[in-house]
Amino acid sequence: MTFVHSCSSVCLLIFSVLFIIIAIRTWTFSVRVDKVRECRSVDSDFIQATDEVIERFQKALKFQTVSVEPHVYNTSELHQLKEFIKSAFPTIHGSPLVTFEEVANYSLLYTVQGSDGTLAPYFLAAHLDVVPVSPELWDAPPFGAEIRDGFIYARGTIDFKQGVMGILEALEYLLSRGIKPRRSFYIGFGHDEEVNNQVKVGTTEKGQVIIELKVKGEPGHSSMPKKESAISILAKAVVKFLSRKPSTNAITRTVTSVTLIQGGVKVNIIPPEATAYVNHRIHPSQSVQEIIDYDRQIINDERVQIRASYSMEPHPLSPYGDEDFGYQTIKNSIRQVWKEAVVAPGVMIGNTDSRHYIRFTTNIYRFSPTFMFPDDVKRFHGNNERMSVKNYEQVVNFYYHVMMNADQEKLPPFHQHSSEL
């Protein structure tokens, strides 16, 4: 009986602690749901995906702005895309409210001057470059931008020329209607995001560390092998990284990918050394040093030399409360375009060029207005990347609503009732 009573006391204590945690989380979690006006095709300010709008998007997708590695990208295609953008959006590039600059030859920076200097400006970012393709594995030409069954097939439809062209279409429409923004804002399109490193709104971003594992062994002839070689020792170390639940790891924890293994000089020679590179994407709750220490512990073999060849700590958590203007503005803009969406903060599982801006602000939000079907996930950085015509229309209208909503001085009054907790 004493044992049962003791267990009951412990269970009660655990339940009480969990109740307190849930209560605190519920109280502090953003529950704000503003009344928003749904974006409808019959609205006077709805931006239709006309033939001209779609053709501009297709032309942008045809430029093969491929980035291969740092400082290795298709400069000719980037230059042509830049010139196309300047000619395709005459209102933007002719407006006295807009200042246009070229940065590092190929990146583009726009400053849109607002009328109220007391309002803090904001920044919209996207990138011009795309990852390489294997054309023989595509069902459609990867830079043909062909429309098949309502989908545009091309590299960059998802990542991330839809953002570039969606922002520009929205701004061109806004300025052509004679709207003069109150709040100043900037637009930046980088040309090397893919090689400087990837519905939830990302309020933080994973860090990254690339670990080099090196084993030095004794060379020899393959006819007289020893019990272990540099490759076999390295292989055992690499196996200890493998996870059993890759489908959920990307969001909930630090993930590990063995991306490169090198070793051997000839088919009949035991290699003198072997090297593997392990790419960790670090959850915001952990640090680079924690990951390195964990690797040493789990490998537990002094013959395996461990060093970090590259590292970046996870990004700070951006605010997402009921009164945080940036997050709530994005949230409301999403709900206007996707009326059934439940918006929640999340972790960006890859890395983006937002890392360049963490020195200037903690209010960094990562969101791509892409509606992906179950079969589309593998298309991201993969084969047959595509976007529906309807989704691109949503992209343009989403950015337009962001610009309009961000132009407000502050959030509308919000009254939270006890029944909402």
Image: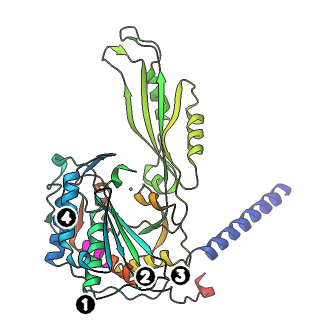
- Label 4–label 3 contact, CB within 8 A: no
Could you say which quadrant of the image residue 159 lies in?
Answer: bottom left
Main SS type for the magenta part? helix
Residue type, mark 4 in image: Glu
Residue at label 1? 42
- Magenta highlight range: 391-397
Say which of 155 and 117 sits in front: 117
Residue at label 3? 32
Residue at label 2? 183
Q: Residues within 10 Å of mark 4 (few under 14, many from 20)?
A: few
Work out how far the residue at label 3 is from the one at label 2, CA to CA, in angstroms: 23 Å
Q: Residues within 10 Å of mark 1 (few under 14, many from 20)?
A: few
Q: Earlier in the sequence, mark 3 or mark 1?
A: 3
The answer to whether residue 305 is left or right of residue 264 is right
Q: Residues within 10 Å of mark 2 (few under 14, many from 20)?
A: many
Residue 393 on the magenta segment? yes
Residue type, mark 2 in image: Arg
